[in-house]
Image (cartoon, rainbow, N blue to C red):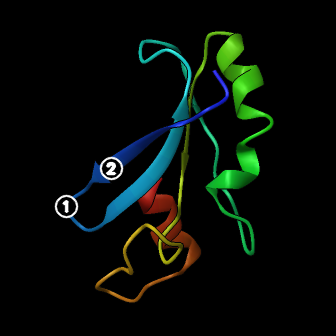
Amino acid sequence: MTTPQRLTLAMPHLRMQALAWGPEDGRLALCLHGFPDSAWGWRKVAPLLADSGFRVVAPFTRGYSPTRIPADGDYSIGALMHDA
């Protein structure tokens, strides 16, 4: 499956959007991007992991559209780790 599923991750502190590939019951492969990339940067690797049985989830990190801008305005490494 090369076309990703789109997910909405509603957390208490932030609503994030993510791309997902693979079986929902597969082992999680959380693929995080950095600046200036986005979740789409995993579009070539994610299907390969999904074909191996992984559930690949690539969130658009805080501040990257379509994820909302965080109300706290915090973009520190600690905040990104908390989101993950």
| x 64%, y 52%: residue | 32
Amino acid, disc 1: Pro
The quadrant of the picture occupied by the N terminus is top right
Up the image or down, 39 lies above or below 46; here it is: below
Amino acid type, label 2: Thr
> Which residue is found at the position 44% from the left and 43% from the top?
6
Element under disc 2: strand
Tell whether 73 sits left or right of 45.
left
- Viewer-nearest residue: 17 or 80: 17
Q: Which mark is residue 12?
A: 1
* Residue visible at 49% across and 14% down in the picture: 23
| Image-quadrant location for residue 73 | bottom left
| Label 1 SS | loop
Q: Quadrant of residue 34?
A: bottom right
**Residue at the bottom extreme of this rendering:** 73
Mark 2 to mark 1 CA distance (whole Å): 13 Å
Q: Is residue 41 above or below residue 43?
A: below
Residue at 45 percent of width and 67 percent of height? 66
Where residue 30 appears, x then y in whole percent? 58, 39
Image disc number at residue 8: 2
Q: Is residue 31 left or right of residue 19?
A: right
Question: Image check: 19 left or right of 53?
Answer: left
Measured from the top left, where is residue 65 in percent x and y?
Answer: 50, 72
- In percent of width and height, residue 26 lies at 51, 13
